[in-house]
Image (cartoon, rainbow, N blue to C red):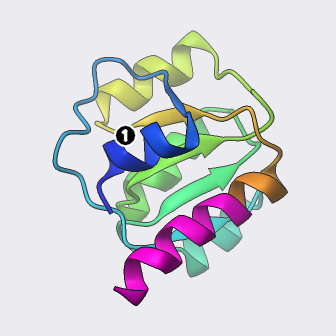
């Protein structure tokens, strides 16, 4: 599923305005707040759902070549995190949903896409 479509269907706010998400594909997602868990288990292209908002999330997303980061609970990253993400071409989104609800909604979207 296209990243832009996920953003629109879940009402996500793209906070890295300088990152072009056009044409980016997401096949699956990973939810975790433990960076070492994400490094060990997330797959290339996954959309990472978390409540972490420090600079290290950008490094992990870049290292794992993730499709982007979604911050739950309306958590807003600091300007330095947004700037680093833009520099590394890592899209960061903000969701109003709790991490549980965000994961469930994203699962339903992506599962439906993989069933077709």
Quadrant (top left/top right/bottom left/bottom right) for the C terminus: bottom left
Give the image quarter of residue 2.
bottom left
114 or 88: which is nearer to us? 114
What residue range appears in magenta?
104-116
12 or 65: which is nearer to us? 12
Q: Is residue 7 above or below residue 37?
A: above
Coordinates of residue 9 in the picture (x, y in percent): 49, 44
Residue 78 visible from this viewpoint: yes
Q: Is residue 58 above or below residue 20?
A: below
Q: Is residue 22 above or below residue 78?
A: below
112 or 19: which is nearer to us? 112
| Residue sitting at x 69%, y 72% | 37
Residue 43 visible from this viewpoint: no
Residue placed under numbered mark 1 in the picture: 90
Number of numbered labels in the structure image: 1
Coordinates of residue 36 in the picture (x, y in percent): 68, 68
Q: Is residue 70 left or right of residue 116?
A: right
Coordinates of residue 41 in the picture (x, y in percent): 58, 80
Residue 6 colored magenta?
Answer: no
Give the image quarter of residue 71.
top right
């Amino acid at each position: 599923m296209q990243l832009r479509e996920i953003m629109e269907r879940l009402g996500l706010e793209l906070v890295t305005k300088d990152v072009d998400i056009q044409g980016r594909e997401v096949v699956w997602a990973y939810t975790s707040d433990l960076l070492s868990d994400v490094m060990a288990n997330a797959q290339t292209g996954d959309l990472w759902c978390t409540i972490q908002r420090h600079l290290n999330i950008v490094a992990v997303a870049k290292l794992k070549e993730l499709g982007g980061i979604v911050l739950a609970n309306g958590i807003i990253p600091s300007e330095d995190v947004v700037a680093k993400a833009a520099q590394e071409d890592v899209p960061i989104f903000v969701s109003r949903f709790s991490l549980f609800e965000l994961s469930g909604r994203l699962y339903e979207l992506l599962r439906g896409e993989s069933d077709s």
